[in-house]
Amino acid sequence: MKSLRASTAAALCLAAATVASAETTLILGEAGPNRGARAAALQSFADDVTARTDGEVKIDIQWGGALFKANAAAQSVSDGVADLGTVIAVYFPQEMLSYGFADLPMLNDDAWVGMRATDELMRSSDTITASLADQNLVYIGTFTTSAVNIACKDAAIRTVEDISGLKVRGVGAYGDTFRDFGANMVPMPIYDAYQGLDTGLLDCSQGYSYAVTALKQQEVMTSYTLLNWGQVGALGVFMNKDAYDALDPETQTALGEAGVAMADKLGELITAANDAAVQTMKDAGIEVIDLPAAERDKLVQQGQQYIDVWVERANAAGLDGGALLEQFQALLEKYAAERDSQGYPWARG
């Protein structure tokens, strides 16, 4: 009996060891905190990967820049500091040039449409895949900051002429376009915009609806203009190519499918958060302005020069910038049509 018990115990230990050896834990570095819509979508991605692999693959998210800061993410993932990481393209204008199309000031203000179009192009373009492979990176999934809008104190933007002379916090090609219309640009992180608006250092701050209420900017602003223009969408999850190549095909497929689903989850969360934020502003007595289409079109037209610059840079780097933009525009139209005919994924029966 004693020998039988010993044999049984040994068999159980061997089985446990086999299960343990079958499990894989991947480390993911994230510079942001574990709160908000994007953090929830990232956690959903991690849980989804585990579910799709029947518990065999777990993703350990290291939040708050514990492994690397945002401006070191691409190189850190490439070097294997983490298996995966969130990369913000604006910090890597050359390395992430092939991802930069998603940051361009195009007419594209729907978060879900933008993410799904970006995601499909990132997966389907052989040139983008090769460009990332040269950096030992593999694309996994995408996020967005959602539509770019502008909050003001003691000022209101109803036409593009209203921009002239205002002290504006703005970034990227959107900020450059504000400057073109006469804004006096003030370099400042979005997290400091509350104080900037409160003290008069800023008249207006470029941002996103959910961020306004998350940072309590409604306390120090008097108007909010929905620009109906574009978004900043070149931020997403990338994986170390060596680590990715070491995985079996089923796990690679699970990561890709979970990456697509992550865009759907963030689309659901951020759309609801933006709608709630605009309502909070209205309830606080803030004037919410819909920029007329004719005025919006002036922004789009002025921003075209920055799109052209990206095309030139992409061509110089061996990418066909014009072809990529055409593909992206076609995908934007594809997913807008899907939304119009079927509704958002989370609202379907």
Image (cartoon, rainbow, N blue to C red):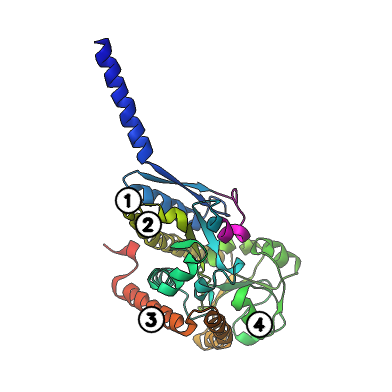
**Regarding mark 2 in the picture, which secondary structure is present there?**
helix
Q: Nearer the viewer, residue 227 or 5?
A: 5
Q: Residues within 10 Å of mark 2 (few under 14, many from 20)?
A: many
Q: Mark 1: few, some, or many residues within 10 Å (few <14, many ≥20)?
A: some
Q: Which residue is mark 1?
A: 52
**Viewer-nearest of labels 2 and 4?**
2
Mark 3 or mark 2, earlier in chain: 2
Q: Nearer the viewer, mark 4 or mark 1?
A: 1
User: In which quadrant of the rendered image does the N terminus lie?
Assistant: top left
Task: Decide which of 308, 240 is in the foreground and name it.
Answer: 240
Q: Secondary structure at mark 3?
A: helix
Q: Mark 2 vs mark 4: which is more N-terminal?
A: 4
Q: Earlier in the sequence, mark 4 or mark 3?
A: 4
Amino acid at circle 2: Ala
Q: Are marks 4 and 1 in contact (CB under 8 Å)?
A: no
Marks 2 and 4, how far apart in space?
Answer: 42 Å
The residue identified by callout 2 is: 258
Q: Answer left or right for 40 relative to 151.
A: left
Mark linked to residue 163: 4
Residue identifier under label 3: 330
Instruction: Give the extent of the magenta segment.
Output: 63-76
Task: Kindly identify the amino acid type of the residue bearing the numbered disc 3.
Answer: Ala
